[in-house]
Image: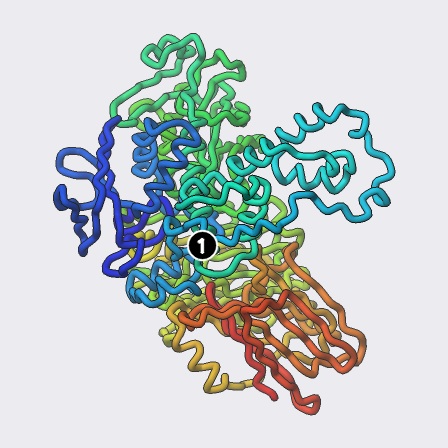
Amino acid sequence: MLPYRCYICGLPLGQFTRSWLDRLTCVRWHGSQVQIIPDSYRQGVEFRSPLGIYLAGVQEDGWFLFAIHTACYNILRLALQATSSDEMLASVCDFFYSMPFEKLFEASDASLQVEFDGWDIFYHPDPRIINNGQKEYLFANPNALEWRDLNIDQSVKGDIQIVNIFVRQKSDDLRKLPPELLDSIIQHLPTKDVRNLFIVSPAAALLRLTPTFWSHRLMQDLPFIELIKGDLDNGISTETRYKCLSNILRHGIGQAADSLRNLQRIYRQAHQVCHTLQLRELMIPPEVSFENTDHGNPPGVNYVSGPHGSEYVDIPLLENSLYFSSFAINKTRYLSGVRIGSHKACSGYGFHYQETLHVLPNYLSAGKVRMSFCHTNGGYVKLGFTTSNNEEAFIGSTSGISISQSEIAVKKSSIMRLEFDHYKIVSIKVGQPGRLKPLILWQPLPPAICKISPLTPSQFTFANDDFREMCYFGGSNGCHLDKLIQIDSFSIGSGFGISGLEFVYIGGKRIQWGSCFGTRQCRLIDGPGGERIVAMRAASSDVGIVQIRLRTNAHRELVFKSTRRAVPLPSPFEEGFITGFHGYFQEKPDLFTGARFLKAIGCLSEPLETPLFVGKQLYQQPNLELSRQARSTTERLSWESHVSFAPLDNIQTITVMHNEHQRLTGLKFTYSDNRLDMILANFICESKDTQEESLAAHEQIMQVTCHYKMEKLLPGKKFLKGLKFTTNQRVIDFGSKSSAVEDVTFQLDAQLPKGLYWIYNVAFDQLFCNFQ
């Protein structure tokens, strides 16, 4: 629990910032009772109001108290009205109490920006920045909007423009339908589908849409406009209002547009929570009441309903196929309930959210069984078995997550106990009655051929809040060493250790280990050419593992680090044919939301013969120092930055990667002289979000122009939006260029070696050419 962050928008609860972040509403909750404490403000660790002084968390009387921004509380009330009623507010409080805070924001397109900006304002509050209209929309007041601030232009045409539609579409079956029926069909389509229908159907595009249609669209797509203050001219049609607001959300600039976008972001977050709670139902047969669920139990199944969400069910392992329900909160899909049997009348336990159940077939028999599972913050996302006959059954998430495996001895009397809170499965125990063992305490089981090296640091001791995880990247589910092409590490900032590793394979498959977000360090490895990891060493500090060095049979090192400071490295390397890692991760929610940091690391090695490296030639980077300007850039950034380099001569193809906000995040160069490919900044091989151009023979880059999106008041925020390479034959453009950019051009000398440096982190880009 993070008492000084808002559960609705994710931003800090302000303190002396003189903005909407300071105005708070405290909420006290116990069971079905909710008490709202308005006009609150934060002073240190206390929340003060005319009604008293409070501390966040569970109180002595058993009530749970938390604070949110008053603006966010108003938005939450609107979302509650849209989904059900204010009676659900107690369920919302229970949800915030039970759900890990970081899961509420992990998929938000602004999640990293919430972290970055939240860090800035939490430690360096500056009212001049927060209240300025040029500030990012995350800090724009969502409740300060008035209709007069928005440019609702009456001149916007209501009719859809049709350009050559009859030429593209000669026949249209919708013309045969009566206009009334066609209008009824369009009324019930999502807005995106309506737009697509207008493109392909002249009959639909020419249909005169009624004001009722646009009123329905306005309330369906933009329900949060009820919080816009003031009155709008009655002469402005609903259609015009809808189109103008949609255009402002997409392209508007200025403080009003930022406030509208922030209002939309927060409403979507609140609505998702309310919608999830609206769908939640108990997994019990229709004819069995919750008070009498024991009557619906099949033979051998024992269900206990206790107070405060301590329900659990004991299920025999050898008798039943199980049907699991799940629900998604952003990127995480939790297992939430179980039904014993496929029919709806069969007994169920836990909760379902009106989604399809996933079957876990029962192939088990007495003997040794390998059990696979994945436990993330707050619950389980994967569960499965592999029998001695190699029969497998899995449900839940299968990619991008570290999976733990252990062997168990199944007997006729073995049971599996599932424990639930009010939303999901929170504990799984397996064993004999009276001798059950929680899965999260099991040690990961590597392949039998693997040798496990000691952990670094060796003095590490186990703690209850640490998670031991194993990552076997050497060969499973098609992720084999001869397909490994990239290894990435992730770090949050200079005050933190490495938080995770990612392995990328041909075909786009990935294995992630730890918390894989933040600033990414990318390193290529020529797995198809026979390059393998044959040695490892790591350095640790009080914040965890801060540097990992992997040596390959191609006589080079892949270096991953999370700090600019020099750290002592152990010697010699841990040697062997390395095919995996094991280690402990530690959560530090008081320092950073949603990240686990690598506290200790060891490797898995196998007694295999290392293949001969026959891949591409390796580029030896010249021993050059960054310019003084580049060095000063890295020193002033509030988040940890990394520096990547690639030569600009003999280039065969240029590939640029972008994210959903059209920020250019990384580059990849392939070369005509059989050199190993080079990547700059955050580039993921096999990604689909790329743009590629090939260079002709003897085509040389003569000039590089960078287009940046700037934040004038925050020099630590600067995004690369476009790149232009001028060669001796043509101009190659990547990305886009808008009015809010800074252009920087580098002239390159054709007679000298040419290289490109990219300094980057999650909120900053800066490119330099050392040879000019």
Residue in the foreground of this view, choosing between 53 and 56? 53
Residue drawn at x 53%, y 31% as measured from the top left: 387
Q: Please state which amino acid type lies under the numbered disc 1.
A: Asp
Query: From the image, which quarter does the C terminus lie in?
Result: bottom right
For label 1, count other residues whose C-alpha is less than 10 Å away and answer few (under 14), some (14-19) or many (20+).
some
Secondary structure state at the residue bearing disc 1 = helix
Which percent across, then down, holds residue 441? 34, 40
Which percent across, then down, holds residue 692? 71, 64
Residue 765 position (above or below residue 428): below
Which percent across, then down, holds residue 308? 26, 27
Please indicate whether residue 63 sits to the left or right of residue 740 in the image: left
Residue in the foreground of this view, choosing between 373 and 238? 238
Residue 194, by quadrant, is: top right
Residue marked by disc 1 = 149
Residue 426 position (above or below residue 603): above
Residue 126, by quadrant, is: bottom left
Residue 9 position (above or below residue 356): below
